[in-house]
Amino acid sequence: MTHDSPLIALLAVGFGLAFVLGAIASRLKLSPLLGYLLAGVLIGPSTPGFVADEGLAQEVADVGVILLMFGVGLHFSPRDLMSVRGVAVPMTLLTIILTVAAGIAASMLIGWGLEAGVVFGLSLSVASTVVSLRNLQDKRVMQTERGKLTVGWLVVEDLAMVLAMVLLPTWAQIRGGTENGEVMTVLQMQDVGIAVALTLGKVAAFGLIMLLAGKRLVPWILRRVVHMGSRELFRLCVLAIALGVAYAASAVFGISVALGALFAGLIMAESELSQQAANETLPLRDAFAVLFFVSVGMLFDPRVLLGNPWPLIATVGIIVVFRSAVSFALLRAFGKSREAAAMVTGARGQIGEFSFILAGIGLQLDLIPEEARNAILGGAIISIVLNPLLFAVLDRVSGKVAGATPPVVAPAAAPKRAVLIGYGRVGSLIGKALDSAGATYSVIEDRPDLVEMLQGRGIPVVLGNGISHETMIAAGAPQADLIFVTVPDGFEAGGIVELARKLNPKVKVYARAHSDAEVEHLRGLGADLIVSGEQEIADAMIDKATAFIPRHVVQQA
């Protein structure tokens, strides 16, 4: 018996194409996000062949937006933002203002009008957080000053776009008073002020409730659930909070689900279990993020751009040329080196998820035409393709302008450093040996009680899972000389070994295994030493059983 299920068709074809095209993009040293967008184009209504259900794809995309914004809130770091606020805040605001001005100019020339130009410019003023962070990770500069500056810049941009998302619906409601060239009266201006105040008041009320109630209630719930000992329940609890808060924000306060999800992430970030919450929900967030980008690609109509390429050319020019030039110039004006300016500018040389959300809101509110959204989507695809080229150009320019090669200074000798992943029965024994040797090491552990114990002993520890890119970086894996992988799950250990190799190709990786299959799996992923529990136990017993097994037999074996 066969079933005609649009949802299964969307998931099967969408994930399948996204995987194939994402893998191809990765092999070409491009962001996999490009492959996801192209997968959406192929299954969209504007291209021949299979066409996915657009309505269903949009609903799935809404869940993707919620989880994306929840992830943004989870990883928001006020400390990192405050450390670079003197540079990130003014540069971000100036870049947004100048990009919006360029968007308005392009919109007026094309014939879209002023209000479309504002939304168009806003959509082009924000870089893709996903792609930018991946660029920083690939360059291994996440924890450097330029990495923190880029992250701070992205955070301020995201906050500005959240404000835009709040105010755009209000603007759409009150814009009728200025149609047909009419000038707003004093009474109309008062109405505008009241409408904006009401909107911001709703957001403030929601934020206050979340701050007062959520800040205590959410961490309390998470602690209670985590002590139940079920990772499945903990994961379900985190997702229920994210989706529940997002829905309540829309149903009760009339604000967007995306903003509600952001608040949920911000509140959960206050908990000591925030890193574990991020790790546990990462697979589902990644899956729905893929579907979000696939659904965005479905909206792109390449035929419109072929008929009139000028809007697309203007869009790409603003993103890649104008905004990059503004960013580079501002960074230099704020005293940053040419190399730092090139790195930060290159990392931000594209647009992405917030641009798509703003374009969708603008089209839904009839603030921009369909052609403008197509230009934004096309500009995103092309800017992601051109991003590696932009990096190369900026590196060359910064190198040429810098002049003579700086003198080579021999690095100071650094102490050997280890990272211990897992502090269970095996990990704790290794930890004691490292303590006895006076070694420098840090620990990654996902059990809060063990984390608290290690913190009390003054041992650097990161609450989370070694399979997480951010957790490994926070623990210092890229700078480590030796990594111990003591987690008992072979599949999880394999992912950690593979990630360790990517972050630090020269590091020694020691891992444990429970079977010959796991040994081969870990060896294939790059582990230098694999210790199998069963083999070690057998060796110890055989070594003692000399009455039955002569030593020369043991040595030959």
Image (cartoon, grey):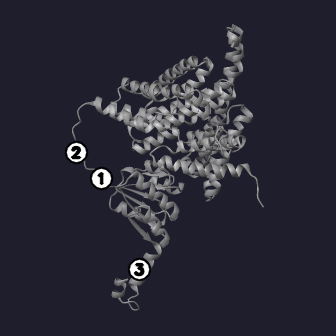
Give the spatial CA distance, label 2 vs label 1.
15 Å
Residue type indicated by callout 1: Pro
The amino acid type found where label 2 is placed reads: Ala
Q: Quadrant of residue 271?
A: top right
- Which mark is first along the chain, 2 or 3? 2
Specify few, some or many for label 1: CA neighbours under 10 Å numbering under 14, 14-19, or 20 or more. few
Going by the numbered disc 3, the residue's amino acid type is Ala
Q: Nearer the viewer, residue 186 or 221?
A: 186
Tell me which label, 2 or 1, sits earlier in the chain. 2
Q: Which residue is mark 2?
A: 410
Q: Which mark is residue 415?
A: 1
Question: Is disc 2 surrounded by few (<14), some (14 to 19) or many (20+) residues within 10 Å?
Answer: few
Name the residue carrying label 3: 540
Q: Is residue 153 above or below residue 71?
A: above
542 w.r.t. 359: above or below: below
Residue at image point 38% right, 25% down: 334
Left or right, residue 328 beside residue 113: left
Q: Quadrant of the C terminus?
A: bottom left
Circle 1 sits in a helix, a strand or a loop, which is it?
loop
Q: Please rate how many residues cluster around mark 3, counting C-alpha atoms within 10 Å: few if below 14, some from 14 to 19, many from 20.
A: few
Residue at the bottom extreme, as displayed: 547
Along the line of sight, the residue nearer the viewer: 262 or 209: 262
Of the two numbered discs 2 and 1 in the rendering, the one whose residue sits closer to the viewer: 2
Q: Quadrant of residue 179?
A: top right
